[in-house]
Image (spheres, grey):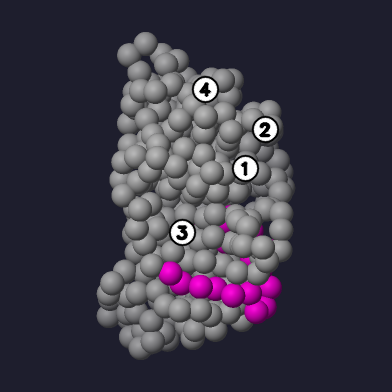
C-alpha cells in the first residue's frame, strides 16, 4: 500500500543539460548526453536523460521499472523504493518520493557500463516474421497464424526494454527496416538475475512481484499489473504448475471475461502480441497465471482480469528462475 502512494509522488530529479529545461529536445540527445546525466535535486516532469539513465541502472540491478520511457515517477519510483529498502538505504527519503545522493551513488557504484549505446540493425533482425497489424477483435486474432511484432521497431523496443515512443524519439530519422542502420538504445542487462528462486511474492497493494531465494533474499523485483476489485487476483498461497514459452491463448468467455458480444471459445495463436505475451507461468489456482503482455507501457497503469501481468522481458526472466513447485504467495 505504501508503494502506491510513493508512485503517485514526483521523483525529485533534473538534468541541467539545456538552458530552460529539456522540453521536447529528446531528438538532440546522443548517448553521451544520457550517460553523463547526474543527480540534481530539482523537479522535472518532462522526459529527461537522468530518468532514462536511472531506469537503465534499476533495470540492470534487476529492479524492473517496467518500460524505460524517460519519465520520472510511477513505476520508476516503485522500483527505486524497492531498491532502497533492499539495500537498507534512505528509508525516509524514498518513501517521500525523493532520490538521495547516497541512494544514487549506491545504485551507480560498481557499474561503469554506459546506460545507452548504439546498435546496428542486422539482417537477422529484419528476417523476423512481422505482422501487418494486430486487430483488437479476438475473432480476427484467432484467424491469424502468429501474433508477431508489427515491425522491427516494436521488436527492438522490447529487446532493449524500451517504450517504443522513446525509441522513436531518440532515433527520429532512423530507417528501422535497413540492415546496418545505427540506433540509440538502452544498454540493459544481458544476463538474468542470479539465484535459485523458491518463492514468489505478489503484492496486490504495491502491484509488484518479488522473486526470493531459499534464504528469503531478493533475487529480482518486477513492477506488475494485478487484478481489480471487480476481477481480483487470487489470495493465499499457490504453486507453479507449468511454464510455457510462446503460449497460445484460450479465450473462454464463460470462465474468464467476455469481449463485447463474442460468446464462443477461441484459441489465439502464439507470439509476443498474444494477450498473455511471450510467457505463461501456470499456477495451481485454476485459470490464473503470471504472464507477459503485448502492451508493456500499460504495466500497472491498467488492471488485469485477475492474472499477474509483467513485461515480456520480465516474464521471460522470471520463467528461467522458477521451476515446477515454486511457491507463489499473494499478499495485500
The answer to whether one can see residue 92 in this image is yes
Q: Residues within 10 Å of mark 1 (few under 14, many from 20)?
A: many
The percent position of residue 197, horizontal first and vertical second, equals: 66, 65
Tag 4 residue: 37
Tag 2 residue: 111
Determine the image quadrant of residue 225: bottom left
- Give me the residue at 59% from left, 61% from top: 211
* N-term mark: 4 or 1: 4
Q: CA distance from mark 4 to mark 3?
A: 28 Å
8 relative to 321 in the view: left or right: left
Tag 1 residue: 60
Q: CA distance from mark 1 to mark 2?
A: 9 Å
Is 275 or 199 nearer to us in this picture?
A: 199
Query: Answer yes or no: do the residues labelled 1 and 2 have beta carbons within 8 Å?
Result: yes
Q: CA distance from mark 2 to mark 4?
A: 15 Å
Q: CA distance from mark 4 to mark 1?
A: 17 Å
Amino acid at each position: 500500500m505504501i508503494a502506491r502512494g510513493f508512485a503517485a509522488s514526483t521523483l525529485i530529479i533534473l538534468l541541467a543539460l539545456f538552458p530552460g529545461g529539456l522540453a521536447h529536445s529528446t531528438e538532440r540527445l546522443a548517448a553521451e548526453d544520457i550517460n553523463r546525466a547526474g543527480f540534481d535535486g530539482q523537479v522535472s516532469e518532462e522526459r529527461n536523460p537522468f530518468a532514462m539513465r536511472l531506469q537503465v541502472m534499476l533495470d540492470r540491478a534487476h529492479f524492473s521499472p517496467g518500460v524505460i520511457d524517460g519519465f520520472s515517477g510511477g513505476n520508476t519510483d516503485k522500483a527505486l523504493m524497492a531498491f532502497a529498502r533492499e539495500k537498507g538505504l534512505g528509508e525516509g527519503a524514498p518513501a517521500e518520493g525523493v532520490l538521495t545522493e547516497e541512494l544514487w551513488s549506491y545504485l551507480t557504484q560498481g557499474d561503469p557500463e554506459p546506460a545507452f549505446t548504439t546498435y546496428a540493425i542486422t539482417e537477422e533482425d529484419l528476417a523476423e516474421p512481422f505482422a501487418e497489424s494486430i486487430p483488437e477483435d479476438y475473432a480476427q486474432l484467432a484467424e491469424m497464424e502468429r501474433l508477431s511484432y508489427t515491425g522491427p521497431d516494436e521488436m527492438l523496443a522490447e529487446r532493449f526494454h524500451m517504450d517504443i515512443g522513446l525509441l522513436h524519439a531518440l532515433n527520429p530519422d532512423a530507417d528501422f527496416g535497413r540492415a546496418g542502420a545505427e540506433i540509440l538504445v538502452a544498454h540493459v542487462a544481458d544476463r538474468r538475475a542470479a539465484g535459485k528462486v523458491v518463492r514468489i511474492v505478489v503484492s496486490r497493494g504495491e502491484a509488484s512481484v518479488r522473486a526470493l531465494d531459499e534464504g528469503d533474499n531478493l533475487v529480482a523485483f518486477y513492477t506488475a499489473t494485478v487484478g481489480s476489485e471487480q476481477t481480483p487476483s487470487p489470495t493465499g498461497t499457490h504453486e507453479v504448475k507449468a511454464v510455457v514459452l510462446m503460449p497460445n491463448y484460450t479465450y473462454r468467455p464463460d470462465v474468464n471475461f467476455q469481449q463485447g458480444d463474442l460468446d464462443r471459445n477461441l484459441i489465439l495463436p502464439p507470439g509476443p502480441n498474444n494477450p498473455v505475451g511471450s510467457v505463461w507461468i501456470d499456477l495451481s489456482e485454476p485459470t490464473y497465471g503470471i504472464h507477459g503482455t503485448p502492451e508493456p507501457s500499460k504495466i500497472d497503469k491498467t488492471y488485469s482480469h485477475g492474472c499477474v501481468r509483467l513485461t515480456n522481458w520480465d516474464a521471460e526472466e522470471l520463467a528461467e528462475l522458477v521451476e515446477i513447485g515454486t511457491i507463489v504467495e499473494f499478499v495485500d
